Amino acid sequence: MISVEQALKKIENTVKVSTPIQKALAESFGLVLAEDVLSPIDMPPFAQSAMDGFAISLNGATTFTLVGEVKAGDGHKFELKKGEAIRIFTGAPVPTSADVVVRQEDCKANSSTLEVNPLPKEGANIRSKAEQIAQGAIALKKGQLLNAAAIGFLATIGVTKVSVNPHPKVAILVTGNELVSPGADLKYGQIYESNAIMLQSSLKGYGISEAAVYRVKDDYTSTREQLEEMLKAYDVILCSGGISVGDYDFVGKALNELGVEEVFYKIKQKPGKPLYFGKKDNALVFALPGNPAAALTCFNVYVIKALNLLTGKRPQGLVRVQKKITEDFSRKGDRAQFLKAAICGDEVAVMEGQSSAMLHTYALSNALVYVPLEITSVKKGESVECILLSN
Ligand code: AMP
Ligand code: MG
């Protein structure tokens, strides 16, 4: 069995960033730029008024002759002589012959003359041409996350397509004879299947809106056949259940028979000890434990890391912060632990009900406290490492 840190390192060494593709800017939210974007234009493309007021050509006096008006979108080019002014509005092009824009609050105007008090400094209230970015300069660098601001910025400079590392095609394989879909009647011995919708929701939160779900009984042949099909069609396969040591756990055997190369199997951790990670050609396979809370923790700690490596996102995993624990904590056994927990301000409270089958307490959590192998107890008020859960 390997440690949590060894497993994370193995993922880092195995997963390569996906081949860049061109995407419409509107479809690039949450992805990462695969190359620098150079600005195709000066932004602003012309000197712009930052205020509603008057553009004036200074002449040493405080009274000016009004010769016209320019509003946002007007293409008319004015030539102002010394001592002349025009009415101007926010966003309108400032004539190159104007020295300054005066706020309308600082002016008195009638139809033909304008008095200004006080006179602002030269250049005031003018957004100069290319002040944000010049044509040909690097607008955003490779590795930049395309968040709302980045997408908005690229739109301001007229970009419509970007080169990005795409999300992988992901599919989920659910195993288990006992599972029935929510909505059906439960017979004795059956439970509702929850991992598929939970993993799909996690993937949606990540930006992967579609993940196909396949279901098999605990049967070697059907597990193998289904996985064989999936390996041909998907970049990332998430198996749920059937990876432990029970007589009816067939996922590991099927993956092995199909030539999937095991990168690791079993981690010294609680929950999620039987986590498996393997690779065949370009397909990555995570076999997650069936217990729902264990499956979600493995997704949050390991699958997110692999997805970030594929898409070039930084940091590679969920954000970790230090918080003070509200109660003493000690653990038995020789496994690192991920504890469902709730952060409030500077403190973190570990939840009651840490069973790997319990999603109820997970739903009330906003973090996982990570207790590494070398730490067996923590006193109330001591700092612990918390992994922030984003969805
Ligand atoms: P397994 O890893 O297949 O041995 O499953 C471990 C536990 O998780 C068992 O109690 C299963 O019934 C439960 N389980 C497995 N898969 C799911 C699922 N998709 N939804 C809900 N519970 C599950
Ligand atoms: Mg099972």
Image (spheres, grey):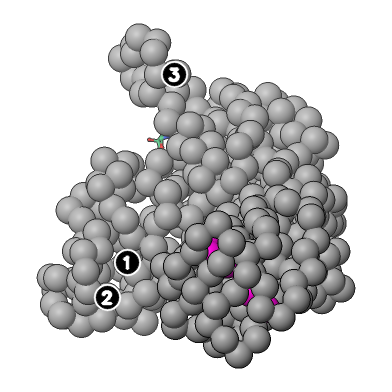
Q: State the predominant SS element of the stretch in magenta.
A: strand
In which quadrant of the rendered view does residue 45 lie?
A: bottom right
**Left or right of 259: which side holds 114?**
left
- The residue indicated by pointer 2 is 323
Real-space CA distance between mark 3 and mark 2, rounded to the nearest whole angstrom = 40 Å
Q: Does residue 389 appear anywhere in the picture?
A: yes
Q: Amino acid at mark 1?
A: Val
The residue indicated by pointer 3 is: 180
In front of the other: label 3 or label 1?
Answer: 1
- At 56% from the left edge and 43% from the top edge, which residue is drawn? 203
**For the residues marked 1 and 2, what is the alpha-carbon distance in whole angstroms?**
9 Å
Q: Position of residue 320 (x, y in %)?
A: 42, 72
Q: Are marks 3 and 1 in contact (CB under 8 Å)?
A: no
Q: Secondary structure at mark 3?
A: strand
Q: Residue at image x 82%, y 37%? A: 232
Say which label, 1 or 2, has the lower sequence index.
2
Tell me, yes or no, whether the highlighted magenta stretch contains residue 231: no
Earlier residue among tags 3 and 2: 3
